């Protein structure tokens, strides 16, 4: 088994702003595994909010080289467990490796990933299309640029209700809103009253991740369901979110890959919670991986590649009507160059 990895830039169509950061270019790290004429690709994006940089991600990947290339592992799950100590402080790096391992492993099985997992791609829920924080005029322009039945609206400003009221005038599409930890419990409960009247489906992470008492209030009194994001990063967080959120949004990058992501989804389902997988502005490598497990989900946010000015890979294509997977087995994404 040969391991390689490298950094690529993902230029965005528009400056992407959420409550705690803005960016015009997203750095991403691609992992490639090669053996017996087959290859597997994985991806993780960097994220300053979580302290994940290209340098520390690649340092962890390099530290795993001996395990990957010479270790005795026969499945992605086994590699993930053997790499637990190496990647304990860097799940982003582990995600990219785990994804590449699933790609090459299922290619060796002669199956697409969703086939190996026993999933039906006809059951994939519609992804939302994300509108980042901007002036209301520019947010309206972004909706007109991509006419979509379901939008996720990023909030966390001093005029959040005004934004939703104004956007609602320009479309009948369903909204989801994501405050990225920006509100208080009192705000979330009060805002939910009007948001429910504006065809908003749910609120994602309205409060700070550690405001458990506040979330108890919101969970009890909100007119809308609430989904955990920043409060549900790794497997041990799922049980903690039960009774505080109606569902969880799993980010494969933050969780450490497909292997723990699948466990988180199944645990949430066993607790009667809704499940969602979200993206971190990945290219079509990471987005295609999400699409393969999407039949398990109630909701999905896999619009990352749609937000790019230039993609570095070819993979799944997404329209409001259907999700089309690339030819070939495994995850199936291929790099466009390099």
Image (cartoon, grey):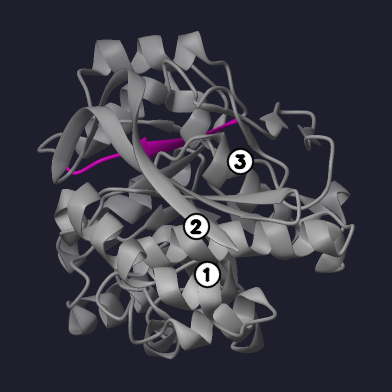
Q: Residue at x 61, y 80 (%)?
A: 77
Question: Mark 1 falls on what kind of element?
Answer: helix
Q: Which residue is mark 3?
A: 127
Q: Which residues are magenta?
A: 150-156
Residue 116 located within the stretch drawn in magenta: no
The quarter holding residue 256 reads bottom left
Q: Which residue is mark 2?
A: 3
- From the viewer's perspective, is residue 310 above or below residue 238? above
Between disc 2 and disc 3, whose residue precedes?
2
Answer whether labels 1 and 2 touch (C-beta < 8 Å): yes
Q: Earlier in the sequence, mark 1 or mark 2?
A: 2
Q: Position of residue 226 (x, y in %)?
A: 42, 64
Q: Secondary structure at mark 2?
A: strand
Q: Residue at x 73, y 43 (%)?
A: 332
Q: For residue 127, which quarter of the picture? A: top right
* 1 or 3: mark nearer the eye: 1
């Amino acid at each position: 088994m040969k391991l390689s990895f490298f950094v690529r830039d993902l230029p965005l169509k528009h400056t992407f702003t959420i409550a705690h950061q803005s960016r015009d270019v997203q750095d991403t790290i691609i992992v490639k595994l090669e053996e017996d004429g087959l290859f597997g690709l994985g991806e993780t994006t960097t994220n300053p909010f979580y302290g994940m940089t290209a340098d520390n991600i690649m340092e962890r990947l390099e530290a795993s080289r001996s395990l990957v290339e010479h270790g005795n592992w026969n499945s992605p799950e086994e590699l993930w467990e053997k790499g637990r100590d190496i990647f304990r402080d860097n799940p982003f790096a582990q995600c990219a490796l785990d994804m590449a391992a699933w790609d090459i492993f299922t290619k060796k099985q002669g199956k697409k990933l969703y086939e190996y997992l026993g999933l039906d791609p006809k059951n994939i829920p519609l992804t939302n299309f994300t509108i980042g924080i901007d002036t209301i005029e520019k947010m309206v322009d972004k909706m007109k640029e991509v006419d979509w039945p379901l939008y996720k609206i990023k909030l966390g400003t001093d005029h959040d209700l005004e934004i939703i009221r104004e956007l609602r005038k320009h479309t009948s599409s369903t909204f989801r809103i994501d405050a990225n930890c920006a509100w208080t419990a009192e705000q979330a409960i009060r805002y939910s009253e009007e948001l429910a009247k504006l065809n908003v489906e749910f609120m994602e992470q309205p409060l700070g991740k550690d405001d458990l008492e506040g979330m108890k209030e919101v969970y009890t009194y909100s007119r809308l369901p609430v989904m955990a994001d920043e409060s549900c990063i790794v497997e041990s967080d799922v049980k903690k979110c039960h009774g505080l959120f109606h569902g969880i949004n799993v980010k494969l990058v933050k969780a450490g890959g497909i292997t723990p992501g699948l466990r988180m989804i199944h645990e949430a389902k066993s607790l009667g919670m809704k499940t969602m997988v979200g993206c971190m502005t990945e290219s079509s490598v990471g987005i295609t991986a999400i699409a393969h497990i999407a039949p398990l989900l109630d909701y999905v946010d896999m619009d990352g590649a749609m937000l790019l000015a230039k993609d570095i890979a070819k993979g799944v294509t997404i329209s409001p009507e259907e999700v089309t997977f690339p030819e070939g087995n495994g995850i199936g994404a291929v790099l466009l160059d390099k």
